[in-house]
Amino acid sequence: MKKLTFAYESQSDLRILNTGHGWKVEAPQSGSRLEGGPLGEDIYQLEQFHCHWGETSAEGSEHTVDGRAYAGELHLVHWNTTKYQSFAEAAQHPDGLAVLGVFFDVGNESNDEIEKIVSTLSEIKFKGQFTDIPDVIDPTTFLPSGLGYWTYLGSLTTPPCNECVIWIVYKEPITVTEEQLVQFRCLSACSGEAEEFIVKNYRPPQPLGNRALRECNA
Ligand SMILES: Cc1ccc(O)c(S)c1
Ligand SMILES: [Zn+2]
């Protein structure tokens, strides 16, 4: 595969919302480019990023490596702007979306970029709430230093689970703290007074089936 290349803009005042299934940062970036690697000749543009986590740090990732789960997984969601006119249209095609997956390992050092997200969560405790992230966010800072990855053709992990995703899962995790994950789990799935905490929002891995899994050791 050709080398995977990416270019993102740094943005402030990005909107973060509580979807009822977790937090999502809306980051449509017409100036962003993800290309090469398994993406053929097409260019993919960043649309949003979000995260999956578990009730404890023993689980939470949506991919496992030799059966090992990580404490969570960040997804940077892109769509194919070479072939399609909109995100919604792209999500109807096998090469429509490209999602970068980054595993979370728990460590003692707070992740400064994730902390920019955590610091807003008290403002979006309930489903449907949203706010702007005052800090400047550069999506590149969420990526690990080692850029080796696995890739395969798969699906969205939330219903309707369209088979429209070229998955690119980095081998090297980034580190977050248990406290940062605890803050994720304090989001409520309800819009009203009732508190139903989103303690986990990951889809358990599905069988690989006859999918070809490729790797790149960047
Ligand atoms: C478009 C999209 C929405 C939700 C998700 O978890 C993923 S992985 C992708
Ligand atoms: Zn996801």
Image (cartoon, grey):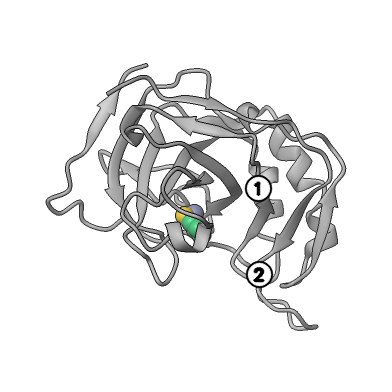
Q: Answer with mark 1 or mark 2, whichever residue precedes in sequence.
A: 1
* Measured Cα–Cα span from mark 1 to mark 2: 28 Å
Tell me, yes or no, if residue 106 can be seen here. no
Q: Residue at x 52, y 27 (%)?
A: 6
Identify the residue position indicated by label 1 in the image: 28
Residue visible at 74% across and 79% down? 191
On screen, residue 119 above or below 139:
below
Locate residue 19, reporting x and y percent: 65, 67
Q: Residue at x 59, y 63 (%)?
A: 199
Q: Bin the neighbour count of mark 1 within 10 Å (Cα to Cα): few under 14, some 14-19, many 20 and up.
A: some
Q: In the rendered image, which quarter contains the C terminus?
A: top left
Q: Secondary structure at mark 2?
A: loop
Which kind of residue does numbered mark 2 sit on? Phe
Between 59 and 47, the residue placed more toward the observer is: 47
Inspect the image, locate mark 1, and give the three-letter code of the amino acid beneath it. Answer: Pro
| Residue 141 in view of the camera | yes
- Is residue 170 positioned above or below 15 on the image? above
x, y percent for residue 193: 80, 83
Residue 197's disc number: 2
Q: Nearer the viewer, mark 1 or mark 2?
A: 1
SS type, badge 1: loop
